[in-house]
Structures are given as structure tokens and as C-alpha cells.
Image: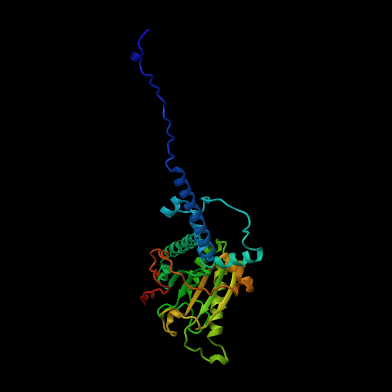
């Protein structure tokens, strides 16, 4: 038996358990959630204060696929990037119908492409005829709130009508009859307006005046279009403005103010013309600059303002 001093000490090892800290990852997740929630409320607030035109722009942005937006391709065969449907709970039916009409007073990108194609087809048809090709510098194409406006301008060297008369010149007749089948293929309705310069008509306002002359010339243009194949049911409005609406940066007696305007109407505008109660709430047609709408046809469209340059004078 060993002595008491020889006893070996008993060592008890106890494993110390240390509880590890979570590292605060839950705080990061909460911060991300709060940031996303704040962004959501910010977007909702911006949309609630935005105008209908701004909302329309946002809607078109999300309706156009990215590849189409980058390449500028045709979106007619594409589908919406964010599908949706159903009524808008923010508006009652009557108010929604009125807003739908007003927000289309600016042509969409799809409308711009459509009207640019119409212009190209008309110019190609005119280019095939040497006689009509000489009138290209008497034509102007621009986009307004009503639709595509085609202006046929008068000059001293090549007037479109006999002096002081609604008798259509032969080349003007050929031009209108060439355009008629192309316009007839469109689903849009047409508006025709006649304009004169400020030189008073013989007899003054007590007799036959520029008011009657502008109306008669618009009506004569209508007859030539119908003779060329235009469907009479496609015509919605024929009017005369005398010398009351002059071209920008021109004198009222300038010959270019003697003109015929053909407007290929947007469907919403045509509906609004039939419904004066809606039309009264709409802004007046203001020309919109359409960069690149002209297709190398001697027609200049100012991309910075609503004015457009004077056409070059034709050789006699």
C-alpha cells in the first residue's frame, strides 16, 4: 500500500461551452427589407403625383421589349414585357373614357412609325412620275396632335389653282389622284382644309371672298381625290380657313399660304371630332417636331422647334 504522500492528484477537465454570436446578419436583412419598402412607397408617391402623359410614357417604356427599344425595330408583332389587363380601379368608366381620349392627343411612337411609312410610300409614288417629281418641294410632311399633315403649297411659278378660282391645275390634279389610292388603303379618316393669302378677293367680304375661295378649293381637292379612287366615306371634314391660319415666319400675303392641307387623322381625334363635348376639352392642334420624319425628299423638319424652313423656289 503506497504512502499518502505518493498519491497522484486527480485532474478534472471541464469543457467550457462558449455561445457564438450571430454576427448581425438579421440586421442586414432587415435593412434591405426597409430599403425596398421605402423605394416602393417612393414609387407609389411619384405615380400619384405624375400627369397622365407621364404615366403614358412609363407605360410605353415597360410595354416595349428591350431589344426593340435599343434597335428601334418594329414593335407591332411584339408582346408586352409586363402583361396586364382588367379595368382601372382608380377611375370610373366615364372619367376613364375621357382620360383615354385626352392622353392620345400626342401620337405614340407606333403612330410615328406608321405615319413615317405613309410618307415614304407617297414620296416613292411621286418619284416614279417625272412630272409629279417636280412638285416634291411644294409638299411638306409634319406631325400634329391630329395626325399626319400633308401640306401642298402654292408658288408663283407653279400655282395649284387658277388665279382667284377653284379650278385645279393639271399637275395638282395628277398629284391628288396619285395620292388617293395610297390614302384609301389606310384605316384612318381624312380631313381637308383650304387656305389663302391675305390679298382680298375681288368683291370684298360682301361678295365672294377668300372664305368661299378657300372652302371651294378644299372641296375641289376632295372631288379630285374621289376621282382618283378615295372612298368618300373616309372623308370626315372639309373646311376653309381663308387667310386666318398662316405658316410660321411668313407674311400673310406670301404665296405659300395659298395651300391645301390633308390630315390623316388619329382614330382618337376622329372620334373626338364626332363628339364635340370631348373635343372641347382637348388642346388645339400644335405641330410636334418629328426628327427624321422626312425621308430625303427636300422637306426639312426642325427638330428643335415647331417652325419649318421655307421650301426652295421651283425653277420656272
Quadrant where the C terminus lies? bottom left
In the image shown, does 225 or 312 lie closer to the viewer?
312
Q: Relative to 241, say whether 19 is above or below.
A: above
Residue furthest to the front: 4
Q: What is the count of numbered marks?
A: 0
Residue 90 located left or right of residue 163 = right
Quadrant where the N terminus lies? top left
Q: Relative to 119, say whether 251 is above or below.
A: below
Residue furthest to the top: 1
Q: Relative to 293, say whether 256 is above or below.
A: below
Q: Residue at x 33, y 13 (%)?
A: 6
The x and y percentages for residue 29 are 47, 46
Residue 11 located left or right of residue 151 = left
Residue furthest to the left: 6
Residue 87 image-quadrant placement? bottom right
In the image shown, does 304 or 205 lie closer to the viewer?
304
Q: Residue at x 49, y 70 (%)?
A: 144
The x and y percentages for residue 125 are 46, 62
The x and y percentages for residue 294 are 41, 65
In the image shown, does 162 or 123 lie closer to the viewer?
123
Q: Residue at x 50, y 64 (%)?
A: 54
The x and y percentages for residue 183 are 53, 64
Residue 11 located left or right of residue 146 = left
Amino acid at each position: 500500500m503506497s504512502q499518502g504522500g505518493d498519491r497522484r492528484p486527480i485532474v478534472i477537465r471541464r469543457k467550457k461551452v462558449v455561445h457564438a454570436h450571430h454576427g448581425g446578419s438579421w440586421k442586414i436583412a432587415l435593412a434591405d427589407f426597409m430599403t425596398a419598402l421605402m423605394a416602393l412607397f417612393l414609387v407609389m408617391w411619384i405615380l400619384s403625383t405624375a400627369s397622365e402623359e407621364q404615366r403614358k410614357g412609363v407605360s410605353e417604356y415597360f410595354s416595349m421589349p428591350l431589344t426593340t427599344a435599343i434597335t428601334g425595330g418594329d414593335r407591332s408583332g411584339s408582346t408586352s414585357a409586363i402583361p396586364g389587363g382588367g379595368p382601372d380601379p382608380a377611375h370610373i368608366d366615364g372619367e376613364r373614357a375621357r382620360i383615354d381620349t385626352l392622353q392620345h392627343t400626342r401620337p405614340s411612337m407606333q403612330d410615328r412609325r406608321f405615319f413615317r411609312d405613309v410618307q415614304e410610300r407617297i414620296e416613292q409614288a411621286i418619284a416614279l412620275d417625272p412630272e409629279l417629281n417636280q412638285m416634291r418641294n411644294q409638299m411638306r410632311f409634319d406631325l400634329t396632335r391630329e395626325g399626319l399633315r400633308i401640306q401642298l403649297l402654292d408658288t408663283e411659278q407653279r400655282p395649284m389653282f387658277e388665279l382667284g378660282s377653284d379650278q385645279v391645275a393639271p399637275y395638282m390634279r395628277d398629284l391628288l389622284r396619285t395620292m388617293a389610292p395610297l390614302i384609301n388603303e389606310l384605316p384612318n379618316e381624312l380631313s381637308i382644309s383650304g387656305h389663302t393669302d391675305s390679298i382680298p378677293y375681288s368683291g370684298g367680304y360682301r361678295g365672294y371672298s377668300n372664305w368661299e375661295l378657300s372652302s371651294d378649293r378644299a372641296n375641289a381637292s376632295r372631288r379630285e381625290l374621289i376621282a382618283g379612287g378615295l372612298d368618300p366615306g373616309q372623308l370626315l371634314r372639309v373646311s376653309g380657313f381663308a387667310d386666318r391660319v398662316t405658316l410660321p415666319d411668313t407674311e400673310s400675303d406670301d404665296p405659300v399660304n395659298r395651300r391645301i392641307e390633308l390630315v390623316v387623322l388619329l382614330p382618337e381625334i376622329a372620334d373626338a371630332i364626332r363628339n364635340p363635348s370631348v373635343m372641347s376639352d382637348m388642346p388645339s392642334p400644335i405641330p410636334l417636331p418629328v426628327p427624321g420624319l422626312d425621308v430625303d425628299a427636300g422637306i426639312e423638319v426642325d427638330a428643335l422647334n415647331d417652325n419649318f424652313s421655307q421650301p426652295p423656289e421651283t425653277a420656272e
